[in-house]
């Protein structure tokens, strides 16, 4: 149900200018169709090397396995401003579905902006290098996905890319987030799941998950379906800002992460990485079809509203 699309024609290993126009157009349509129907698509042959993905997963695991007293040194500030979103988030601090207990997960938020305070370089010397390198790969892949989305929507090919020109800089809150769902040997609260039902807030999200599974997606008119880990793919999903921008032509689909039923898997931690993409702060999210279905809102204001409802 969630399509797997072969990204070869626009793969990061090849120069953008050398891409074949016909193949690109077909890829653009496949991606837009997926975002119109399910809001999720798997990309294979995307070009982010497997060694980089494996490397950041294992580095991140090392961090999460440190004692809480150590991790607290790198904690995210409790002011939920979008540009104050860097660092470690402790267990059960986020309510993605307010009707459930808080999510039993930890996170580490990284933005490319130079800020050594929240980076654990002193205990993991390769941290900044590995995270910045991975961030840049995600950024390049996302810009290419945005090109294809513009093409698929028949607007200027660089329209969305231009609206995201500050990714990695002051003025754009795009965040690489490492998620860690610890083993659940000690039981769970009634109604608790690993990550509560939600839609993402931004324009698009890249998601890399390990082999544990549990992610589910709820396409319109259907029940939740699993979004199983498929090795060497990246899952891309659409967020609320893009749904609003396209006046509901493309859909931001609800998703969640369940606790595995098998005892063995329950007792294993789960890891994922999300690259949450946002337009530059000043960009106005205004219905592209001129329908005015949603009031224009600045990218920054919209995100601050959503954050206020998420954190405990
Ligand atoms: O961990 C996952 O697989 C998904 C997490 C997620 O959807 C999110 O943090 O927005
Ligand atoms: Fe999400």
Image (spheres, rainbow, N blue to C red):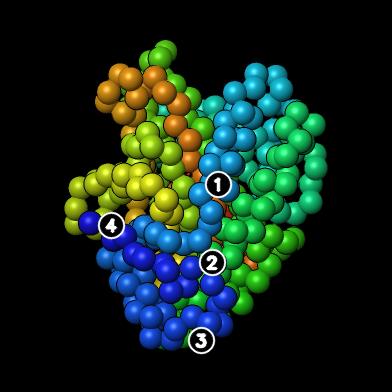
Instruction: Quickly name the residue at label 2.
Output: 12
Label whose residue precedes the other's in the sequence (2 or 1): 2
Instruction: Quickly name the residue at label 4.
Output: 2
Look at 49% across and 80% down and name the residue there. 19
Closest to the observer, 301 or 213: 213
Look at 47% across and 30% down and name the residue there. 181
Label whose residue precedes the other's in the sequence (3 or 2): 2
Which residue of the protein is positioned furthest toward the top in this rendering? 186
Instruction: Quickly name the residue at label 1.
Output: 51
Compute the Cα span from label 3 to label 2: 21 Å
Position above or below: 116 against 132: above
Compute the Cα span from label 4 to label 1: 25 Å
Label whose residue precedes the other's in the sequence (4 or 2): 4
Nearer the camera: disc 1 or disc 3: 1
* Image spot of residue 60 (x, y percent): 60, 35
Quadrant in the rendering for residue 284: bottom right
The image's mark for residue 88 is none
Position above or below: 119 against 163: above
Quadrant where the image shows the C terminus:
top right
Asked if disc 1 is less than 8 Å from ligand 1, the answer is no
């Amino acid at each position: 149900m969630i399509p797997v699309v072969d990204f070869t024609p626009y793969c990061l290993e090849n120069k953008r200018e050398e891409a074949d126009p016909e193949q690109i157009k077909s890829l653009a349509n496949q991606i837009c169709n997926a975002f119109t129907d399910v809001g999720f698509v798997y990309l294979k042959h995307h070009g982010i090397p497997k060694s980089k993905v494996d490397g950041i997963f294992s580095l991140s695991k090392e961090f999460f396995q440190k004692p809480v007293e150590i991790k607290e040194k790198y904690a995210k500030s409790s002011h939920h401003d979008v540009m104050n979103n860097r660092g470690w988030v402790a267990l059960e601090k986020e309510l993605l579905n307010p009707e459930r207990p808080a999510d039993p997960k930890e996170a580490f938020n990284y933005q490319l902006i130079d800020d050594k305070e929240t980076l654990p370089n002193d205990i993991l010397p390769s941290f900044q290098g590995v995270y910045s390198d991975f961030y840049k790969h995600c950024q390049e892949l996302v810009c290419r996905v945005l090109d294809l989305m513009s093409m698929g929507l028949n607007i200027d090919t660089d329209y969305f890319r231009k609206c995201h020109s500050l990714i990695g800089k002051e003025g754009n809150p795009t965040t690489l987030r490492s998620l860690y769902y610890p083993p659940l040997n000690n039981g769970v609260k009634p109604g608790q799941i690993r990550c509560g039902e939600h839609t993402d807030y931004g324009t698009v999200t890249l998601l890399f998950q390990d082999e544990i599974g549990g992610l589910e997606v709820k396409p319109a008119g259907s029940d939740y379906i699993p979004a199983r880990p498929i090795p060497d793919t990246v899952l891309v999903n659409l967020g609320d800002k893009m749904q609003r921008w396209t006046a509901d032509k493309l859909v931001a689909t609800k998703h969640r992460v369940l606790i595995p039923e098998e005892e063995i898997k329950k007792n294993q931690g789960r890891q994922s990485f999300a690259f949450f993409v946002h337009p530059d702060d000043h960009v106005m999210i205004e219905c592209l079809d001129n329908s005015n279905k949603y009031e224009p809102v600045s990218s920054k204001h919209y995100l601050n509203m959503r954050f206020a409802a998420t954190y405990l």
